[in-house]
Amino acid sequence: MGSGRLAYGAVHAAALTLEKSQIPAGAFSLYLIPQKDRWILVVNKNVNAGSKYDERQDIARAPMEMGQLGEPTSTLEVSFGRMGPRDCSLRVYFGKTGGWAEFLEK
């Protein structure tokens, strides 16, 4: 994925938790900060298109679980999947690397 940040928008209707952080219902930007051996998922309250990333707007940060994919992807793939009645998983695949983080509904 290289260095830098990847931005992705998200809107949700319920309050969530990401690790120990509380995320109120609303619209947010999601950022991935790639590091050598892990990715950091950032939930940021600034949703203005084209605006620069501002760390002071972060409301949650969490390291993503990481793994190797059996088949590499040729493009970046981002998806949300419902894992249970109150559990949603964000999955990000790039090349042979996959990362995921779980959001729980409060």
Image (cartoon, grey):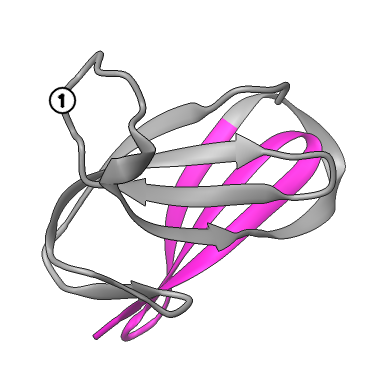
Q: Please, what is the three-letter code of the amino acid marked with disc 1?
A: Asn
Front residue (pair 95, 28): 28
Compared with residue 92, is residue 102 higher up or lower down, i.e. above or below? below
The part of the chain drawn in magenta is 77-106
Give residue 5's position: percent from left, percent from top: 53, 27
Front residue (pair 23, 65): 23
**Magenta span: helix, strand or loop, mainly?**
strand
Give residue 47's position: percent from left, percent from top: 18, 33
Question: Which residue is disc 1 drawn over?
Answer: 48
Give residue 58's position: percent from left, percent from top: 33, 49
Give residue 61's position: percent from left, percent from top: 47, 58
Rendered residue at 34%/76% (across/down): 17
Compared with residue 2, is residue 54 higher up or lower down, i.e. above or below? below
Q: How many badges with numbers are in the image?
A: 1
Location of residue 87 (image quadrant)? bottom left
For label 1, count other residues whose C-alpha is less than 10 Å away and answer few (under 14), some (14-19) or many (20+): few
Secondary element under disc 1, as helix, strand or loop, is loop
- Which quadrant of the rendered structure holds the C terminus? bottom left
Compared with residue 20, is residue 10 higher up or lower down, i.e. above or below? above
Location of residue 81 (image quadrant)? bottom left
Location of residue 34 (image quadrant)? top right
Compared with residue 76, is residue 68 higher up or lower down, i.e. above or below? below
Q: Residue furthest front?
A: 56
- In reply to whether residue 88 is colored magenta, the answer given is yes
Rendered residue at 84%/48% (across/down): 37
- Which quadrant of the rendered structure holds the N terminus? top right
Tell me: 88 left or right of 51: right
